Each structure stands twice: as structure tokens, then as C-alpha cells.
Amino acid sequence: MNYNFPIILLAAFSSLIVGFVWYNPKVFGSIWMRETGIVMDGSEKKGMVKMLLFNFIYSVFIAMSLHPIVIHQMGAISMVGGPMMVEKALPSYANFINDYGTAFRTFKHGALHGFFTGLFFIFPLIGITSLYEKRSFKYVILTAGYWSVSLMIMGAIICQWF
């Protein structure tokens, strides 16, 4: 099971779409700006292309990291030494993949693991960082919420179509 880069790219791109909706002033954008002290005066457009490009690149890294979390069969592949070693694996590996190769490979299951990754990994990371940056709990909830929704969608895409 190798990386399916078009699906990784689609999953990464989905975080941009979620961000466009999530941080829209009519959704949570106004609250986020108030909590961060950011004022939209038109000057933010200057570096927007660079910001979106790096957002996408970082999201590709996240999607690649999410892949083994949402697809359980990656654990079996890692047990035989990775994709390069599959041909040398014992017959029990092939039997296992034949029996369970598509188990838990649904949109809903990927969304579940994406949500748990957001809740139990991203939320604490943002929470800890925000303590030292003296950010409000509202900021933590808003940012962790964005990443939880993004990871749910990314995980769903990866798990369903990878």
C-alpha cells in the first residue's frame, strides 16, 4: 500500500476549504479576529498567496501523517518492514491482508479517527501553546475546532479513497 498522492493532495486541499468557511467573518472569523487582535484593513492581502501556499504544504504533511492513523492496515505493513518488504513477508501477512485488507475503510471511520486525532492530539497542543501565548480559551476552542473538523474531513477522504 503506497501513498496515493492525488488523495493526499485532495485531503490537504480540503483544509483550505474548511478554513475559508470556518474563518469567514459570517461564521467564526469575527470572533477569531477579536481573540487574536487581528484587524482586517486590506494589508493582509499582500502575503496571502505565500500564506496559502505554506498552509497547503503543511497540510500535505498532516495528511501524510494522518494516513497511518486512519488506515489500520498500515500497522500490518509496518510489521513486515514497510511497503518495500511486502514481497518478502511470510504467507500469514498475505492471509491477513486477504481477510482484513478493506476492514474499517470507510468515510465515516476515517472521520472518526480524524476527530479523535483533533481532540486528543491537536486540542492539547493548541491548548498548551495558548497557555504560554496567553490566548483565551475561546481562541483554543476555535482553533482546535477548525483542526478537528479539518482532520475529520482529511481522515474521511484518506480512509475512503486511499
Image (tube, rainbow, N blue to C red):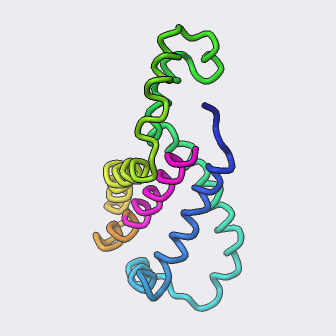
Q: Visible in this render: residue 62?
A: no
Name the residue located 47 percent from the left edge and 30 percent from the top edge: 73
Name the residue located 57 percent from the left edge and 55 percent from the top edge: 11
In the displayed structure image, the side of residue 21 where residue 124 appears, left or right: left
Q: Residue furthest bottom?
A: 41
Quadrant containing the C terminus is: top right
Majority secondary structure in the magenta region: helix
What are the residue bounds of the magenta stretch?
A: 145-162
Q: Position of residue 83 (x, y in %)?
A: 62, 24
Can you say whether 91 is above or below 67 in the image? above
Q: Nearer the viewer, residue 79 or 161?
A: 161
Q: Visible in this render: residue 75?
A: yes
Q: Position of residue 41 (x, y in %)?
A: 59, 91
Q: Quick check: is 156 in the magenta stretch?
A: yes
Can you say whether 28 is above or below 157 in the image? below
Quadrant containing the N terminus is: top right
Q: Position of residue 154 (x, y in %)?
A: 51, 55
Q: Nearer the viewer, residue 136 or 150?
A: 150
